[in-house]
Image: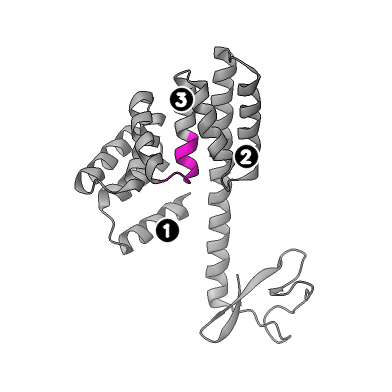
C-alpha cells in the first residue's frame, strides 16, 4: 500500500498534477473520506475538467455516507468515463442504497461487460441474478451491497500486492540483469515459452524478457 502511494505521488507530481488531487487520492486510500472530499473539491475548483477528481469525489462521498451527493457526482463522471469500472460500481451501489434496483441493474450490467477482475465479475453476476429474481428485501439488498464492496476492496488489495511485487522485481533486475545464454547469474532452466526465461520452480519463476540499454532483463 505504502509503495503504491509513493508511486502514485511520483507519477502525479511528474505530470504536474495539482497537489490537491494528489492529497485527495492519498486521503481516499487511507480512509480519510471527508478530508479526501475537500481535496477533490479543491482540485475541481481549480480545474472543473478534472474527471479523475470528480470520480474520486464521488467515491469519497459514497464512503462518507453522502449517498445523494455521491450519485450526483458519479452521474456526471459516467457521462465522461463510461468504461471506468469504479464509476459504474459505486454508482450501482449508490442506487442500491437508495432502493433503485432497476438503475442499479443497469450499472451492474454495464460493469459486467467491462474488463474487470474475475472475482469481482462473478460477484456482480450473482448480484444481477438476485436482482432479476424479483423485489429485494432490505436484508438482501444490504447483503448485496456489502458483498460487492468487500469483493471490490479485496480485488484492489490483490492489485496493490501485484504492483508491489512487479516493482520490487523490476528494481532487483535493474541491478542484476538476467542473461538467457547460460553465463548470467541464473541458468536458463526453462526454455518452453517463447519470450519467457527462468526456472518454472521457486525461487525464480518464468519472467518476461525485455531489453534495457542493449542488455536483456527479466521482469
> Which residue position is annotated with label 2?
121
* Any part of residue 86 in sight: yes
Quarter of the rendering containing residue 124: top right
Counting other residues with Cα less than 10 Å from the Cα at mark 2, is it few (<14), some (14-19), or many (20 or more)? many
- Helix, strand, or loop for circle 2? helix
Q: Which numbered disc covers residue 95?
A: 3
Residue 91 in the figure: left or right of residue 129:
left
Q: How is the image coloured?
A: one colour
| Residue span colored magenta | 81-89
Q: Which residue is pictured at 33% across the width and 41% down the height?
A: 54
Mark pair 2, 1: CA separation = 27 Å
Nearer mark to the viewer, of 2 and 1 = 2
Horizontal side, residue 115 vs residue 103: left or right: right
Q: Quadrant of the C terminus?
A: bottom right
Q: CA distance from mark 3 to mark 2?
A: 19 Å
Image coordinates of residue 63 in percent, x first then y, are 41, 30
Q: Quadrant of residue 98?
A: top left
At which x and y percent is residue 34?
31, 32
Amino acid at each position: 500500500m505504502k509503495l503504491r502511494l509513493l508511486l502514485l505521488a511520483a507519477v502525479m507530481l511528474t505530470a504536474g498534477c495539482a497537489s490537491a488531487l494528489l492529497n485527495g487520492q492519498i486521503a481516499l486510500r487511507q480512509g480519510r473520506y471527508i478530508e479526501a472530499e475537500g481535496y477533490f473539491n479543491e482540485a475541481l475548483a481549480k480545474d472543473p475538467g478534472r474527471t479523475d477528481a470528480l470520480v474520486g469525489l464521488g467515491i469519497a462521498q459514497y464512503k462518507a455516507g453522502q449517498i445523494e451527493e455521491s450519485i450526483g457526482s458519479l452521474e456526471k463522471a459516467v457521462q465522461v468515463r463510461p468504461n471506468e469500472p469504479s464509476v459504474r460500481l459505486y454508482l450501482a451501489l449508490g442506487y442500491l442504497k437508495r432502493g433503485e434496483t432497476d438503475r442499479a441493474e443497469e450499472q451492474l450490467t454495464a460493469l459486467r461487460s467491462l474488463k474487470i477482475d474475475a472475482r469481482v465479475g462473478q460477484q456482480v453476476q450473482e448480484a444481477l441474478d438476485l436482482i432479476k429474481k424479483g423485489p429485494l428485501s432490505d436484508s438482501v439488498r444490504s447483503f448485496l451491497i456489502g458483498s460487492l464492496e468487500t469483493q471490490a476492496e479485496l480485488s484492489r488489495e490483490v492489485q496493490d500486492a501485484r504492483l508491489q511485487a512487479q516493482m520490487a522485481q523490476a528494481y532487483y533486475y535493474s541491478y542484476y540483469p538476467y542473461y538467457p545464454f547460460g553465463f548470467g547469474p541464473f541458468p536458463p532452466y526453462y526454455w518452453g515459452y517463447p519470450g519467457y526465461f527462468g526456472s518454472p520452480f521457486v525461487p525464480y519463476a518464468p519472467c518476461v524478457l525485455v531489453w534495457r540499454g542493449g542488455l536483456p532483463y527479466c521482469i
